[in-house]
Amino acid sequence: MDELDKIQQLEKHSRLLEPEDNTRTYWQTQTNAYAESFIHKRNTRKAYEDSSDNGLGLLDSPIEENPLNIDEVLKLVEKSIVPPGIDLTSSRHFGYIPGGGLYPSALGDFLAAVSNKYASNFFASPGSARLENQLIRWIADLMGYPETAAGNLTSGGSVAHLIAITAAREAYQLKAKDYHRVVIYVSSQTHHSVLKALTVAGMREAEIRYIPVDKAYHMQTAQLPAIIDDDRKKGLLPFMLVASAGTTEVGAIDDLDTLADVCEHNKVWFHVDAAYGGFYILCDEVAAKLKGIERSNSFVIDPHKGLFLPYGSGTVIVRDRRHILAANSYQANYMQDALQDEELEPASLSPELSKHFRGLRMWMPLKLFGLKPFRAALTEKVYLAHYFYKHIQQIPGFEVGPFPDISVVLFRYVPSEGDVNEYNRALVKALLKDGRIYISTTTIEDNYYLRLAVGVYRTHLEDVELCLQILKEFTAKA
Ligand SMILES: *Cc1c(COP(=O)(O)O)cnc(C)c1O
């Protein structure tokens, strides 16, 4: 076969990657029909599905030379991907920090994929880069950050922490030889992604100083200046303090303003983990508790939690853009035509180069809904958590943790006899088997707790009522 024949033959097959109009329409119609039926069944599905398949069905369908049709593909999705595990879109999903996944984000992802805009680089996709910078500026303004700030839309809070830590490292011009002397101040409630990010950043040998928490799990501030002083006297380098604006376990917001004072006075980088709590600044009931975040050097905030986006959306913002740029900007000869200074380049603010155009999935819901329903939904979640906190205590045997700072309630059942932890472990097992609600757990100081995290936008009073009713039923015999 000569070269031209070969090319033509290959073309015939490679053209299969461009579906005909009617094929595209059919795929779209079938996929949309499946999505619609998924959404319509939201109230009848379990919040947790312990299926025997658990994804195994996928393995019976290996990746092969020949294609499947869309109906067969959707059958696999319906059997092995969507049902098993937690229904993270469920109004009765109260585990971890839920969000739900807003529908317009799916449309944003769809358009991002169809257009394949390159949101890393202004020259290639000026509109996408500008859109992402506009969203970051909006968040920076919400938090009261100055014009000098810059940030990045990341895959989530974990990568956002990594970026903040490397920016701080640049700001303090730390080198590997310094790491063993570096001290990072956290509390027992600090999210593990911070420690993971420190490890990824190569700073595992840094000293992690656990500052005690008060009864409501806020980092204690009184001893902090003396602790930092002590470290300095020992020849160590107090480097960074990580405060929580809504811990994952209990939702506690640290005293950010006081911590900002301490950090400022001691020249310690003040980083705030607002992955969960940050967007609650949109509701008056919580905004005052976030005071002080505007004084931080960097913060992390997750649109896939507080803005109810589907997973894959975090944000980092650094007060002084020079530091995040120092940690992430590189130039390559092959990209010399793309240099410009009109807009910050997303790729210069992140370890990623080619990346998903995440801005569109955040922008679509904000534009299509406006901010008003977001404020209402966040405030509703806060009131629902308060409602649960009050009513769970009226069911005999239940005890609660601290009054929620945001929308997480810690609680457990204390049976008249027997081991409390064992009882609650069995209770959660029974709840999982039932599946109507999903609640996750944590262990604090050897006590096993259930946590109700109200955070899915579609969770309303009836869902919390159902939750109370189920908990009452399941403990009635104890
Ligand atoms: C969820 C969460 C994180 C981690 O963020 P991911 O988006 O899951 O990577 C960090 N901190 C807190 C407080 C969180 O709730």
Image (cartoon, rainbow, N blue to C red):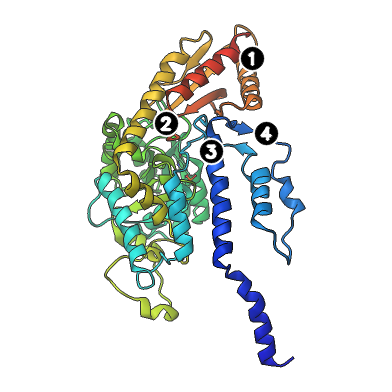
First-in-chain label (3 vs 4): 4
What amino acid type should be assigned to the residue bearing mark 3?
Answer: Leu
Residue depth check, mark 1 versus mark 2: number of the one nearer the observer: 2
First-in-chain label (4 vs 1): 4
Residue that protrudes farthest toward the front in the picture: 22
What amino acid type should be assigned to the residue bearing mark 1?
Answer: Asp
What amino acid type should be assigned to the residue bearing mark 4?
Answer: Asp
Residue that protrudes farthest toward the bottom in the picture: 2
How far apart are the two marked residues, 4 and 2, measured between alpha carbons?
A: 28 Å
How far apart are the two marked residues, 3 and 1, measured between alpha carbons?
A: 31 Å
In the picture of the structure, the residue carrying the numbered disc 4 is: 50
Is 232 displayed left or right of 351 in the figure?
left
Q: Residue at x 32, y 49 (%)?
A: 367
In the picture of the structure, the residue carrying the numbered disc 3 is: 88
Residue 18 place in picture, x, y as percent: 57, 70
Using a 10 Å C-alpha cutoff, classify the residue at mark 3 as few (fewer than 14 neighbours), some (14 to 19) or many (20 or more): many
Q: Residue at x 42, y 57 (%)?
A: 166
Using a 10 Å C-alpha cutoff, classify the residue at mark 4 as few (fewer than 14 neighbours), some (14 to 19) or many (20 or more): some
Residue depth check, mark 4 versus mark 1: number of the one nearer the observer: 4
First-in-chain label (4 vs 2): 4
How far apart are the two marked residues, 3 and 4, measured between alpha carbons?
A: 14 Å
* Residue at disc 4, CB closer than 8 Å to ligand 1: no
**Quadrant the C terminus occupies:** top right
In the picture of the structure, the residue carrying the numbered disc 2 is: 251
Q: Residue at x 60, y 30 (%)?
A: 46
Residue 419 - label:
1
How far apart are the two marked residues, 1 and 2, measured between alpha carbons?
A: 27 Å
Disc 2 on helix, strand or loop? loop
What amino acid type should be assigned to the residue bearing mark 2?
Answer: Gly
First-in-chain label (1 vs 2): 2
